Image (spheres, grey):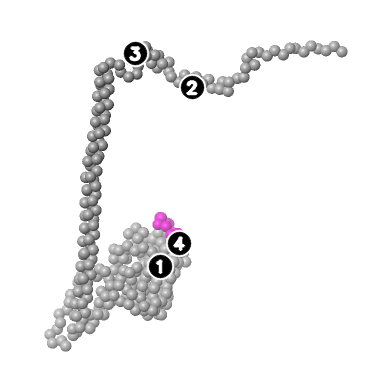
Amino acid sequence: MCGMSQPPHHRSPASSAPARPDASMSLLTHVMDHSLDEGYAEAAGRREAEGTAGLPRTLKAKLALAAGLVLAAMVVTLGAAEARLSAPVLAKERQELIERVERADERAHGLERAIERLRTDVAERQRAALKQPGSGQGELVALLSGATEVRGPGIKLVVDDAKGASSGDGGGPRESAGFSDTGRVRDRDMQKIVNGLWQSGAEAVSINGQRLTALSAIRAAGDAILVDNRPLVPPYEVLAVGDKKRLGTAFQDSADGQYLHVLQESYGIRYTLSAADEVRLPAASSLTVRTATAAEQQKGAS
């Protein structure tokens, strides 16, 4: 059996050397290997050959460079000196502003103390006037008008926003009536609650320590509720003086009490109602009589 000769295996020199990994990126390789443009390299070589490369060699150029450095140092020094000089001035102005604020606070506290003294004097004069003949109804008028502090049995109603309530814009059923469907208590809610308490037989009402009178206004400023232009924050504590047994039941059975119940069921607004043996309501802080005048005492009145 004759065997066939196998052709010799010859490897070319090109196949013996491994190919470069970046052979397919010749353009990028050229850019990396020749980062400096040939024109720039030629100009740098020419300057070096002419002796103009590096720092200036002539005396004039050296003096100009030194002058520039001195000028820069002067600018920096003057800037630092100006900042050092202005620092005490700013500190003095700041201290003067602090002193002005402290003086204004002291004057405000003095005015508050003067107001308290005047209120005490007015109260004493009122009590003295009530002792005169024919003035027996003055105390009742002061009580009903909110001019004096009151205390007695009544109810305590605490109203609070729903859990997780936000102030974003809403599109719920309350939005059409000027409310935002966000679970927050609004000024009109408080108006209905207070009106319901008056209608149910309350003799005096306050919200978060603000006594309500016939001249009181409950309004809104954004999401805040204002009572006589004073902002209140939840929870809202409503105190009412009256028959503690009948007042709470009458309010819950009224239309406004049912309205509060709907707010709880539909919007998650929270409230608690409890009877109290004694509640204390302060006098109204801003009681201004616009049209009433003191009646002259009739001659011969006993």
* Mark linked to residue 32: 2
Question: Along the horizontal axis of the image, is 41 left or right of 299?
Answer: right
- Distance between mark 3 and mark 1 Cα atoms: 90 Å
Q: Amino acid at mark 1?
A: Val
Q: Amino acid at mark 4?
A: Lys
Callout 4: SS: loop
Q: Residue at x 43, y 18 (%)?
A: 37
Q: Is residue 11 above or below residue 28?
A: above
Q: Residue at x 83, y 12 (%)?
A: 3
Callout 3: SS: loop
- Location of residue 102 in the rendering, given as x and y in whole percent from the top left corner: 23, 57
The residue that disc 1 covers is 159
- Location of residue 55 in the rendering, given as x and y in whole percent from the top left corner: 32, 19
- Location of residue 46 in the rendering, given as x and y in whole percent from the top left corner: 37, 12
Q: Amino acid at mark 2?
A: Met
Q: Is residue 169 above or below residue 229?
A: above
Q: Is residue 21 above or below residue 128?
A: above
* Mark linked to residue 218: none
3 vs 2, front mark: 3
* Mark linked to residue 51: 3
Q: Nearer the viewer, residue 137 or 171?
A: 137
- Quadrant that contains the N terminus: top right
Mark 1: few, some, or many residues within 10 Å (few <14, many ≥20)? many
- Distance between mark 2 and mark 4 Cα atoms: 64 Å
Toward which corner of the image does residue 54 lie, by quadrant?
A: top left
